[in-house]
Amino acid sequence: MTFKGRHLMKNTIRVGAIAAVSALALAACASAPEEEATSSATADAPAAAEPVDFKACMVSDSGGFDDQSFNQSGFEGLTRAEAELGIEIATAESATEADFAPNIEAQVAAGCDLIITVGFLLSQATVDAALANPDVHFAIIDDLADNDFDGEIDAPNIKPITFETDEASFLAGYAASSATGTGTLSTFGGMNIPSVTIFMSGFLAGANYYNDTNSADVKVLGWDGTDGQFTGDFSDQTKGKNVTEEFLSQGADVVMPVAGPVGLGAASAVQSAGDAWLIGVDSDWTLTTDYADIIFTSVLKNIGNSVFDTISETIDAGFSTEPYVGTLENEGVGVADFAEGTVDDAVLTELETIKAGIIDGSISVDLS
Amino acid sequence: MSADSQTTDRPDEEAPAEDRWRRALREIVESSSMVVFMAIVASMIIGGVLIIFADEAVRESAAYFFSRPGDTFSAIGAALGSAYSAMFNGAVLNLEASSFAGVIKPLTQTLTMATPLIFAGLGLGIGFRAGLFNIGAQGQLLMGATLGAYIGFAFDLPWGIHLLLAVIGCAVGGAIWGFIPGILKAKRGAHEVIVTIMLNYVALYLVAWLLSLDAFQREGSDNPISPIVAETAQYPQILGVQFNLHLGFLLALACAWGAWWLMERSTIGFRLRAVGANPSAARTAGMSISTATILTMVIAGGLAGLAGSAPVLGTQKFLTDATAGSLGFDAITVALLGRSRPLGIVLAAILFGGLQASGPSLQVNAGLPVDIVVVIQALIVLFIAAPPLVRALFRLPAPAHEKEVAA
């Protein structure tokens, strides 16, 4: 560096520093809040009328609370409970599996009344902690807390929270079959694990049901009931894009990605194709993504509601180990509104009948 | 002196890329302990600044700093106080606990977290000193964990023998995964950095596939999670059941002594170091470079595989495709931080174990994102990789050999 260059650089730094300092100074010029202002602000907060003496805590799996999937949905339920029920909350994200047990232990030590763990990976750690701390209440999302597979919960103080997602994706599969122009639907998953494939199985069963009742021949690419198309992780959007392009080239015009953020890659492929639709999962993708105009519908898994309900029930009626099972009936799962002009009124009526049939058990969503 | 340095400088200028790579590695590995210590201090200070900015109370009170500055300072004090006391309570001694066991529990947790890092760091350290930049500890660790866990849950063997076989299985699994890049480098000249990185992916997806097979799944479940390792194959908890600290920690310390003896006292270690310091001279002296390369990678892989025993036989006791976490990459930092010497690696691993052990307490008690810990770790690496920066910050003198070159 020449002498001149060094001089110039010093000047640049100086100007930058002055700018930064003055920005800080300006930002710091606001007037101090009056003491009573803070108390009135708390009173104004919606529904936080009576702060409850209850501490709900949550441990994420290694996806973290920003995974656009179940950790995030669960976290939203927790923060909603904080705002509306006036409870205290604490959270711990797990960077690796080695953090599961320490995170739960830290929350037990911090005096949490209810500890909610997210995902089957935490099952063992949750059971161990529940057995070691019989006075603390636990809930686990997407797992039955039954690691010896005897059909019973392994500890007397764990509430399992699970979802019959196939009931909702069955409806999506039926509606998509009625709407497809090419007679070909497609789906893919992040990994071949039950909480993912339950979406795909319901979707396939819905399409099969459409074929049976309407003597149609709609095909579903990417899942045959036991094996299918998986990207191998829940993070690489490029893979989602590639898989989707492959599906579209094989004639599919509806894609349902069950892979968390990988689905955004699928959405971008569908958007550039222009003549295809995407089915969102977990949350309503017309609200949570930037792809509202290509979303056919979304298969909803209302984890946030289940967390909120579990907390509010525990406060009102005491803790119960009765498993929470999200179904069409209790609106733990469901489908979002269909894109305008894609589904006929006749089909909408049929869907209502099917939904009633699933709820009363006369229609099975299992793959036969 | 200046003439002398010129003659040694000239061959360097024409040196192929490989030699420059080795030299850069050596410079990082040989950075002085003062630089390492100051890098830790500097990253803690910057971490403190981040803690201040991450704190909501500080940000709120800073908005009216000029009308009531005291608020900001007390908020800063509260934020730093709660963060550092949460760190101390989570990683060293929990002074708020009621029982003695509760007080020392964080310390045992720190040592538990350090165990896999000691194993893998030792393996990488040996590689660095032999001039091999092995990025593959992650894959080697996972393969070790896979083989060890399989022996642990699939067989029914008596006490003692079962654990021994499972531990050997871990070492063998890792050693195989280290042997592959070793032989490719020795016989075909394939660069170990690329091969080991790619083998990490191979290992990850291989394990993901294995976990989709019934043989690796729990009966009655399709989740990609292996059965629990049999009790006969688990590391005993050396301080009793209320602490997670297991026999693997003592094994790691034994390996650290073994690595020291190997590198400092044995003929093999001398050869490995000679090859790392100057391969051409070592070859001229009649040492086989390819044997040294393969041997180094097998030892490094075996130690990384033993690191895999810590989760599958010690803490979690089952295998998933996330068992390795980021251990294999953290171990690179540990090895660099420990300057590739066994004692340094043990201390660095305990530091990192402590940072990780403080994560839950930081999040739950201080309400800080766990990312702060990761940022502090990353900053330590950054500062160690840039010794001149640390020297400039703390006005440390440059080491003798750099002065000579500058003269």
Image (cartoon, rainbow, N blue to C red):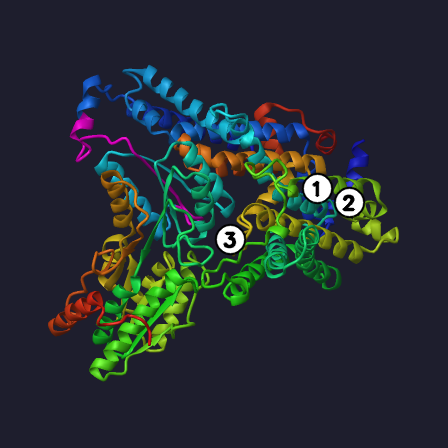
* Residue A26 visible in rendering: yes
Q: Which residue position is annotated with label 2?
A: B277
Q: Which amino acid, mark 2?
A: Ala
* Circles 1, 2 touching at the beta carbon (< 8 Å): yes
Task: Residue A204 in the image: state x and y as whole percent.
Answer: 31, 73
Quarter holding residue B228: bottom right
- Local packing at callout 3 (Cα closer than 10 Å; few below 14, some 14-19, many 20+) is some
Q: Chain of mark 2?
A: B
Name the chain under label 3. Answer: B
Q: Residue furthest bottom?
A: A215
Chain letter of disc 1 in the image: B
On the image, the x and y values in percent for residue A206 come to 27, 72
Mark 3 and mark 1 on one chain: yes
In the picture, measured across the screen, residue A158 lies left or right of residue B144, that is left
Question: Separation of disc 2 and disc 3 at Cα?
Answer: 36 Å
Rendered view: B383 above or below A325 = above
Residue A86, image x, y percentages: 24, 34
Residue at 72% of width from left, 48% of height from top? B131
Query: In the image, are marks 1 and 2 on the same chain?
Result: yes
Which is nearer the N-term, disc 3 or disc 1? 1
